[in-house]
Image: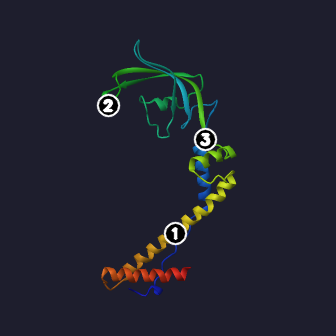
């Protein structure tokens, strides 16, 4: 093995622990978010309640009142083509129609030209919640955390040392992996595997003592 004292391996920085703590808290705010009625045009991610009618000429194929759909950001359709893009921008009480030419590729029971009538009844947006004591109690129960956690600050103080240790361990493991890689790249002598492993472990232990 080469003289490791002559080698230089950049020690990785520990991630911003406070930012990771806030990221987890924000994830919980989103998880326990509520749907709130809004009076504005439909936007991506909204939940929309609407009347839906699909007909071919005078023949009504589907007539469904109070259909509910959560609009995905990617516009993925769950029923018929172009439904999301036609709902976007509509306002409560507004009606509109659009036509489609359905084919076998649409995987629907009908083919040919059809018309779809939409009437928006209600629009709701997903609103993150504040981490009140009630929400914190739900988090504690769902995540099986300590019952001593009562407030958002309690959650923050609980998370910080756990994330701190996790990120320090991650940085330390990355550092040792880089050291092993450097030792391997600079080694000029082939050792039997068992002996090589013993020597590497010895060097790692020396490094750990120096870094402690």
- Is residue 196 placed above or below 139 in the rendered structure? below
The label number, if any, that marks residue 33 in the structure image: 3
Q: Is residue 48 left or right of residue 180?
A: right
Residue 205's label in the rendered image is none
Q: Nearer the viewer, mark 1 or mark 2?
A: 1
**Which numbered disc flags the more N-terminal residue, 2 or 3?**
3
Q: Check disc 2 and report its element: helix, strand or loop.
A: helix
Question: Residue 105: which numbered mark, if any?
Answer: 2
Report the Cα–Cα distance between label 1 and label 2: 50 Å
Residue at left offset 59%, top offset 65%: 164
Please state, as top left, top right, bottom left or bottom right, where the C terminus lies in the image: bottom right
Q: Earlier in the sequence, mark 1 or mark 2?
A: 2
- Where 1 sits versus 56, above or below? below
Q: Quadrant of residue 115?
A: top left
The CA span between labels 2 and 3 is 37 Å
The local crowd at label 3, few if under 14, some if 14 to 19, many if 20 or more residues have their Cα within 10 Å, is some
Q: Give percent across and percent down for residue 49.
A: 55, 27
Q: Which residue is mark 1?
A: 171
Where disc 3 sits, the SS reads: loop
């Amino acid at each position: 093995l080469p003289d490791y004292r002559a080698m230089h391996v950049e020690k990785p920085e520990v991630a911003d622990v406070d930012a990771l703590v806030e990221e987890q808290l924000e994830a919980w705010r989103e998880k326990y978010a509520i749907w709130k009625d809004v009076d504005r045009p439909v936007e991506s991610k909204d939940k929309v309640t609407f009347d839906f009618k699909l007909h071919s000429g005078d023949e009504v194929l589907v007539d469904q009142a109070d259909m509910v759909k959560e609009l995905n950001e990617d516009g993925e359709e769950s029923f018929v083509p172009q439904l999301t893009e036609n709902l976007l921008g509509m306002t409560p009480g507004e009606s509109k129609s659009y036509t489609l030419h359905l084919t076998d590729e649409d995987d629907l029971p009908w083919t040919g030209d059809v018309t779809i009538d939409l009437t928006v009844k209600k629009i709701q947006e997903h609103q993150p919640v504040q981490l009140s004591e009630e929400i914190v109690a739900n988090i504690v129960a769902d995540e099986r955390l300590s019952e001593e956690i009562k407030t958002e600050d309690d959650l923050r103080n609980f998370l910080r040392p756990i994330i701190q240790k996790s990120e320090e361990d991650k940085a330390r493991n990355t550092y040792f992996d880089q050291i092993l890689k450097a030792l391997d790249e600079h080694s000029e002598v082939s050792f039997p595997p068992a002996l090589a492993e013993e020597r590497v472990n010895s060097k790692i232990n020396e490094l750990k003592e120096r870094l402690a």
